Image (cartoon, rainbow, N blue to C red):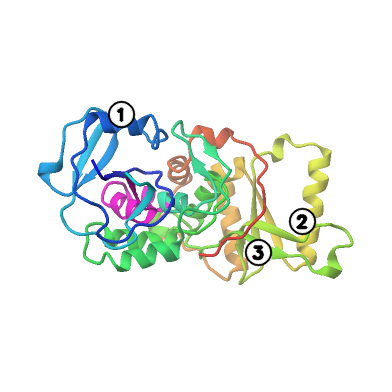
C-alpha cells in the first residue's frame, strides 16, 4: 500500500500535500493494526479510512471505509510520513458538518482553532503553542469546496467560531455568549481569544509584566472576561496577584469581568454577565426565543464534560493568535 488516507476528529497540521497526491489504495487489516500501534496510536475507534472507490473499500475490524471518488481541493490532506496522509483540519471540519449537530460543529471549529488538545479519554491538554488551523484558513478552504456536501452548513458555523481558545470552558463560554438568540445564545459579537495587551512602559512601576493575555476580549469596548476555575479554592497570594492584574488592566483602560466555573454553569448568573458585556458593547439582548434557565443550563452542559468542570490549571500565557 502506497498511501492510506485516514480521517479522524483530532486532525493536526503536520505538513501539506498537493492536490492529486493521494494515490488509490486498498487498506489491509495488518496495515491498519500497524498504524494503530504506531503513527496514529492517538486515534479513537473506529479508524476512518478514505478510499477512492468501492473496489478499494475493505471490511476491517475497528475501521470504517468511506468512498470518495471526486477530487478534493488542495489543502485536503497533511503528511505524517511517506506512507501516510491524514485529513487536514479543514477537510475534517467539512466532513463533520454532515455528521454532527450545528452546535457540535461550532464546538469542533473552536477546538480545531484552539490552544488546547482533547485526549481520547476526554481530558484536555494545554501544550499547544499554535492552533492546527484558523478561521481564515477554514474560510479559504471552504471557498474551494463550494457545492460539496456540508459546505453551506460549515460556512454558517464559521460565523460563531473564534481562534485561540485556551480551554474547553472558555470555548463553551464564547459559544453561548455569541450564538444567536434563536439557538440559545446571547447574540454578542465574537471576542478575541487570549488577546495580547501590551503593557505601557510607564505603567510597569507596579508590575514586571510586558503584556497580558485576556481570555475573551472585545477591543471595540475594551472589556475582557477572565475565566477562573479556581477562584473558590485560591489563597491570599493568588488573590493578591489577580487583584494586581485587574488593577494593571484598569490602568490600561480595560474593564475586566471575572467568570467562575459556578457562574458559567449557572444560567442566571451567566445571563447577568452577558447583559453586562452587552451593555458595554451597546448590544441589546432581546431574548425572543424565551429560553428559560433550565434550557440554557442544558445547552451549557452539552458543551462541556465532567473533566472540563473539574479541571484546574495554570495557563502558559505566551502568545496571541490572529484569526
- The residue wearing badge 2 is 246
Distance in Å between CA atoms under marks 1 and 2: 52 Å
Residue 246 in the image: state x and y as whole percent. 76, 56
Q: Indicate left or right for 191 with 92 as reference.
A: right
Q: Which residues are magenta?
A: 84-106
Q: Quadrant of residue 183?
A: bottom left
Q: Secondary structure at mark 1?
A: helix
Q: Which mark is residue 33?
A: 1
Q: Quadrant of residue 152?
A: bottom left
Is tag 2's residue or tag 3's residue first in the polypeptide sequence? 3
- Is residue 266 at least partly visible in the picture? no
**Residue 216 position (above or below residue 64):** below
Q: Which mark is residue 310?
A: none
Q: Residue at x 19, y 48 (%)?
A: 24
Q: Residue at x 60, y 41 (%)?
A: 261
Residue 34 in the image: state x and y as whole percent. 33, 30
As rendered, which of 75 and 95 lies closer to the eye? 75
Is tag 1's residue or tag 3's residue first in the polypeptide sequence? 1
* Quarter of the N terminus within the rendering: top left
- 53 magenta-colored: no
Label 2 environment density (alpha carbons within 10 Å; few <14, some 14–19, many ≥20):
some
**Residue 91 position (above or below residue 121):** below
Distance in Å between CA atoms under marks 1 and 3: 51 Å
Q: Indicate left or right for 272 with 212 as reference.
A: left
As rendered, which of 90 and 170 lies closer to the eye? 90
Residue 119 in the image: state x and y as whole percent. 47, 36
Q: Secondary structure at mark 3?
A: strand
- The residue wearing badge 3 is 223
Amino acid at each position: 500500500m502506497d498511501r492510506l488516507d485516514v480521517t479522524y476528529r483530532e486532525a493536526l497540521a503536520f505538513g501539506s500535500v498537493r492536490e492529486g497526491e493521494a494515490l488509490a489504495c486498498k487498506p489491509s487489516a495488518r496495515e491498519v493494526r500497524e498504524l494503530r500501534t504506531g503513527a496514529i496510536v492517538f486515534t479513537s475507534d473506529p479508524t476512518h479510512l478514505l478510499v477512492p472507490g468501492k473496489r478499494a473499500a475493505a471490511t476491517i475490524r475497528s475501521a470504517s471505509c468511506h468512498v470518495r471518488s471526486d477530487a478534493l481541493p488542495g489543502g485536503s490532506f497533511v503528511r505524517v510520513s511517506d506512507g501516510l496522509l491524514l485529513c487536514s483540519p479543514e477537510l475534517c471540519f467539512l466532513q463533520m458538518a454532515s455528521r454532527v449537530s450545528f452546535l457540535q460543529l461550532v464546538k469542533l471549529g473552536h477546538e480545531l482553532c484552539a490552544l488546547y488538545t482533547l485526549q481520547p479519554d476526554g481530558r484536555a491538554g494545554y501544550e499547544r503553542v499554535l492552533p492546527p488551523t484558523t478561521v481564515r484558513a477554514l474560510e479559504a478552504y471552504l471557498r474551494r469546496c463550494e457545492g460539496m456536501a456540508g459546505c453551506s452548513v460549515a460556512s454558517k458555523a464559521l460565523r460563531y467560531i473564534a481562534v485561540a481558545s485556551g480551554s474547553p470552558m472558555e470555548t463553551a463560554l464564547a459559544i453561548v455568549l455569541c450564538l444567536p438568540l434563536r439557538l440559545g445564545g446571547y447574540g454578542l459579537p465574537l471576542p478575541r481569544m487570549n488577546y495580547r495587551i501590551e503593557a505601557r512602559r510607564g505603567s510597569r512601576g507596579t508590575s514586571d509584566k510586558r503584556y497580558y493575555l485576556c481570555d475573551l476580549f472585545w477591543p471595540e469596548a475594551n472589556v475582557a472576561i477572565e475565566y477562573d476555575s479556581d477562584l473558590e479554592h485560591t489563597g491570599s497570594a493568588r488573590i493578591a496577584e489577580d487583584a494586581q492584574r485587574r488593577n494593571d488592566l484598569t490602568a490600561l483602560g480595560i474593564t475586566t469581568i471575572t467568570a467562575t466555573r459556578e457562574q458559567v454553569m449557572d444560567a442566571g448568573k451567566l445571563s447577568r454577565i452577558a447583559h453586562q458585556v452587552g451593555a458595554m458593547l451597546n448590544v441589546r439582548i432581546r431574548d425572543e426565543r424565551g429560553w428559560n434557565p433550565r434550557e440554557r443550563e442544558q445547552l451549557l452542559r452539552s458543551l462541556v464534560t465532567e473533566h472540563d468542570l473539574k479541571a484546574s490549571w495554570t495557563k502558559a500565557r505566551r502568545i496571541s493568535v490572529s484569526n
